Amino acid sequence: MPIELKMPALSPTMEEGTLAKWLVKEGDTVKSGDIMAEIETDKATMEFEAVDEGTIAKIVVPEGTDGVKVGAVIALIAGEGEDASAAASAPAPSPSPAKAGEGQAGKAGQGEGSAAPSPSPSQSAGADRAPPSPAKAGEGLEGRVKASPLARRMAEAKGIDLGALQGSGPGGRIVKADIEGAQPGAAPKVAAAPAAAPAPAPAPAAPAAPFETEIPHEAVKLSNMRKTIARRLTEAKSTIPHIYLTVDIRLDALLKLRGELNGALAARNVKLSVNDLLIKALAVALKQVPECNVSFTPDQLIKYSRADISVAVSIPGGLITPIVTNADGKGVAAISSEMHELASRAKDGKLQPHEYQGGTASLSNMGMFGIKQFEAVINPPQGMIMAIGAGEKRPYVVDDALQIATVMSATGSFDHRAIDGADGARLMKVFKELVEAPLGMVA
């Protein structure tokens, strides 16, 4: 029997991915550890290694295929002593497990409900029930209409006469897809429905019409990353009550310290950025105000004992947030070196899931683009994100005298379910103090 290569789960939340590129072809011999393919998850393109030895007998899923479910068979390998051509001619499993049940509807005890994606409660219930007993009218007779148990229950609910349908399943069997595409008709007489029962379900809605415009344009297919960003931002803005708190912060002392540290670190080829120091400041502030270093769940408040800072990095096609773990306990030189390495691998799509999934709070800096101030969207399940604006020369009161100083605006977005406004204000105050007197955070 050929060995089945299945779509791996490359992150804890991965449900499907894109088979971006095959690095082997049919007939190639592989051994454990060989890189076979590149798989695009929602945040990165990762390499898929072989764990078995043998010959690639058949590539089931061609490269460039989107939406390949985790666990779907993507290739077949002929083992030692096995004829690769015979293995290639064996029937290949469907590359999409979600549809696997459709072709098996004729087997005893199987209905479409267990294999169909996201069934409705009524469909799930129908799929879990045993087939109707032979004692019911019409069953066991040679002229009986052939239909799956789920199709019968759906037809009854929608008022569809099974005898008027042409089945598309094996041997003309009526399956779920036939019911979904049928219009309600005269229903067989059944017991009266409860008073609160809704009217028969309407026919399935037609697919959304494609976008049309007379303006010259290019239609670009959404990447897995863009789909994930859209889903998570929609979730965050629709379910998390954001509260925004803004402070103006004088940067002159931080810039002076950065220059001195870079002079001392030049021999080690380390060059600190302002962002490196702000990562450290946010981490230390979270340790001093632990009420903001939290995550909200429906029945618990998760309080973190260390500050892991997710840092927004723009990459081709989207945004990713590599994590500086234990940032409160690391020196700024270590943070700078780690952040440089993480950002470089992020732009190459080479981060591992644990390097961008998690974190206790986030920092997003758009000051390098000249953005004065903005409000960032919380990255769930975190409880806050700090948005950093550009440092610019402004009139500023220093020691009761109006002077020109380098000032930036920082805005904290807080999950108001988990963090009270007063606690958020305390965090912003501590963050401001650390940036304006930076020796306190590097000591």
Image (tube, grey):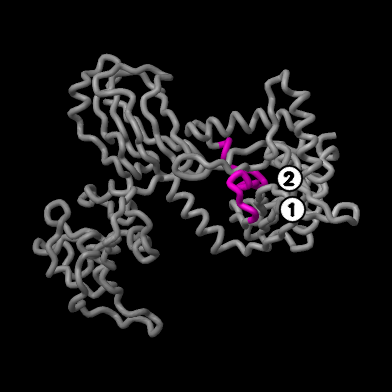
Measured as percent of width and height from the top left, residue 409 is found at: 70, 53
Identity of the amino acid at label 2?
Answer: Leu
Residue 411 located left or right of residue 67: right
Q: Quadrant of residue 129?
A: bottom left
Which secondary structure lies at badge 2?
helix
Q: Nearer the viewer, residue 204 or 53?
A: 204
Quadrant including the C terminus: top right
Write down the region rendered in magenta: 354-373
- Dot 2 alpha-carbon crowd within 10 angstroms: few under 14, some 14 to 19, many 20 or more: many
**Residue 44, position as x, y percentages in the image:** 47, 37
Task: Name above or below for residue 29 compared with residue 320.
Answer: above
Say the numbered circle drawn on residue 188: none
| Residue 62 in the figure: left or right of residue 385 | left
Instruction: Kindly identify which numbered label has been placed on residue 394.
Output: 1
Residue at 70% across / 32% down in the picture? 272
Which residue is disc 2 drawn over?
282
Dot 1: what SS? strand
Q: Is residue 159 magenta?
A: no
Q: Give the residue drawn at x 66%, y 50%.
A: 389
- Which residue ends up furthest to the left in the rendered image? 143
